[in-house]
Amino acid sequence: MRWLGPLGIPMLLGACASTVATLEPEPQLPVCDPAASALVLWAPAWRANQKDAGSREAAAATGLRDFFARPACFASTDLRRLPDLQPPTLATALASTSRAPDRVVGIEVHELGPVLRLLSSAALVEGGTEVVLRIVEYAPPSVAQVRSFQVHWRHGGAGVIKGVASLPQDMQAALRAGLQPGDTPR
């Protein structure tokens, strides 16, 4: 316990969590339109060596479902998981809709998970969670891209260690940052 005192104080002082969200390219107009209907198509795009892809996908699905369950972004949302966001897959999904949506949005999930870096700063431990999404807006009824941008959302900092329990909420926070619903402070 004696050795914890000298090491514990700097770690506690450095244990400050912060949230950073960046859009590339920036700035972006809001994707959300509370008066519009939307078809939101999402697909995982994990790296080849992604660990626990199934758990991350389940967390992504929960976060997406909970985010679009509220009418803050769109008046109504048809949310579907696709294997990819390639034009033939998108065209098939769009053709299978019973009524034409006002908006078609694609969301590729590239990263969703905890991060931990040892010995990267004076605090010895730096961690948190990270979400990386590619957002694509299409021009219905075609699958022509109107715009595409990336959302990189991180929450954490020196002395912060997070697990997987917050991943659905982290996904929702990244979606708020990227899609900019009307209830998000700007």
Image (tube, rainbow, N blue to C red):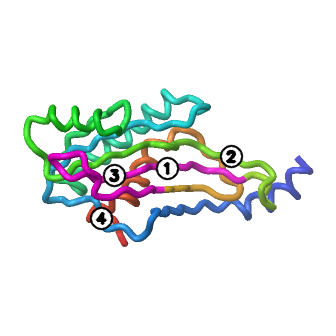
Q: Position of residue 108 (x, y in %)?
A: 41, 43
Closest to the camera, between mark 1 and mark 2, is 1
Give the side of residue 151 with respect to residue 48, left or right: left
Residue picked out by circle 3: 136
Is the Cβ of the residue at disc 1 closer than 8 Å to that at disc 3? no
Q: Which mark is residue 132?
A: 1
Q: Which of the two discs, 3 and 4, labels the residue nearer the N terminus?
A: 4
**CA–CA distance in space, label 4 to label 2:** 32 Å
Q: Please report the residue visible at 45 percent of the width from the left and 65 percent of the height from the top.
A: 25
SS at badge 3: strand
Is the Cβ of the residue at disc 4 closer than 8 Å to that at disc 1? no
**CA–CA distance in space, label 4 to label 1:** 18 Å
Closest to the camera, between mark 3 and mark 4, is 3
Closest to the camera, between mark 3 and mark 2, is 3
Q: Which mark is residue 116?
A: 2
Q: Please report the residue visible at 34 percent of the width from the left and 43 percent of the height from the top.
A: 64
Q: Which of the two discs, 4 and 2, labels the residue nearer the N terminus?
A: 4
**CA–CA distance in space, label 1 to label 3:** 13 Å
Q: Please report the residue visible at 9 percent of the width from the left and 35 percent of the height from the top.
A: 98
Kindly identify the amino acid type of the residue bearing the numbered disc 2.
Leu
Give, as a single range, the part of the protein colored magenta: 126-151
Kindly identify the amino acid type of the residue bearing the numbered disc 3.
Val
Closest to the camera, between mark 4 and mark 2, is 4
Kindly identify the amino acid type of the residue bearing the numbered disc 1.
Val
Quadrant of the drawing holding the C terminus: bottom left
Q: Which mark is residue 30?
A: 4
Q: Local crowd at mark 2 within 10 Å, few (<14), some, or many (≥20)? A: some
